[in-house]
Image (spheres, rainbow, N blue to C red):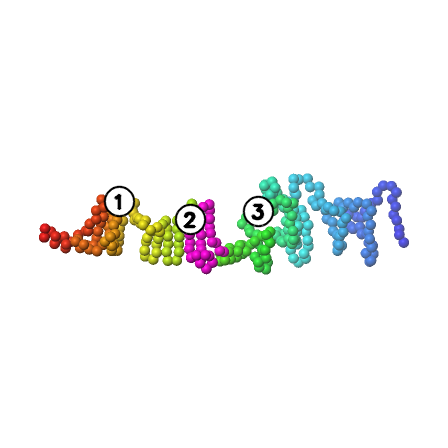
Amino acid sequence: MSKILNVNTGNYVARVASGNTITLDTGAQAGTVVITGDLQINGETTTVSSQQLDLVDNIITLNKNESGAGITLNQSGIQVDRGSLTDALFVFDEDISFNDPITQTVKAGTFVLKTADNAIIGLRTNSITTAGGDLYLINSGTGVISVSGTNNYETQVTDDDDIPNKKYVDDTVTTGIQTITIQSIQRGDSALNLYDSGLDVGVSAFRVTIDGTEVALFKSGSTEIEDIVFENNTISTVTSATDLTLSSSGTAFVVIDGVLKMPIQSDATSFAPGDNIVVYGKDPGFGNSGVYYTNKNNYEDELISTNRSLMFSMLF
């Protein structure tokens, strides 16, 4: 049977001696205490021993009536009792700053997940949104972003928007170097071109073109550089009847460190030296040397040997 205490006017106060307890006991079956108005608790500690707490309020205010600029005690948040393990906290810490990507300034105050002994702990989620702005990570020190603990992360990077790790980059570069095929490198009208007889028409070759002009051609057995052909132990010109010039800078000499061998020209061979002197070999004549010259006056003669010179001097 219900009983009602009705106070028509004024307040109703239930008071016990200082330090004692007022208990609203609903019996062994744990009934319900209903408060139809607001509940105001003026003490320093509120303890709720129920196993489940349901709140209709959509916002819970912590550190209410703060009068300072920021949290006077530096931190405010929620602490989770973990029994024999260190408690976990989700707090807002005024002492920790962050880099604001919008204003490009350092601002005070950061949400922190940690244990009661200030060890940082993890957060499990599958999405972070920035409302379209930049996302800053780490922001100080020498830390790195790591995917440690994943299973072959580098092989899972397949989408254009996937973020690669160092292993993915290393593997990609290594594979690229091992398998890449570059036939031509070109900038403007200068280029390097590579040909292989097994893949391309013609012989295998490496061609160098500068400003639209071929300056070098490397082939198996011969090399052509600036109209000069190097083939085995022979140096010649690309174009027939073109002079091959060996010169040195200034007044230095062209030194031949070995024996000079000249082929025998036919007697009908003649040379037009211009303003130069041409030296060549023919069958030995009266001079008995076989070394001939033609000067700029187109005069041809044979250099005389020492013995033949002595013989002529004695005869004449």
Q: Of the two numbered discs 1 and 3 on the same chain, state the one appearing first in sequence.
A: 3
Which span is picked out in magenta?
180-209
User: In the image shown, does 271 or 108 lie closer to the viewer?
Assistant: 271
Determine if residue 233 is in view.
yes
Q: Circle 3 sits in a helix, a strand or a loop, which is it?
A: loop
User: Callout 1: helix, strand or loop?
Assistant: loop
Number of the label disc, if any, that sits on residue 139: 3
Q: Amino acid at mark 3?
A: Asn
Q: State which tag comes first along the sequence, 2 or 3.
A: 3
* Magenta stretch contains residue 189: yes
Residue at mark 2 to residue at mark 3: CA–CA distance: 49 Å
Q: Nearer the viewer, residue 163 or 211?
A: 211
Looking at this view, is 66 or 268 the one in front? 268
Q: Position of residue 281 (x, y in %)?
A: 23, 54
Q: Which residue is mark 2?
A: 209
Q: Which residue is mark 1?
A: 274
Residues at marks 2 and 1, CA–CA distance in whole angstroms: 34 Å
Please state which amino acid type lies under the numbered disc 1: Gly
Residue at (37% x, 52% y) in the render:
224
Q: Residue at x 42, y 55 (%)?
A: 205
Tag in front: 2 or 3: 2
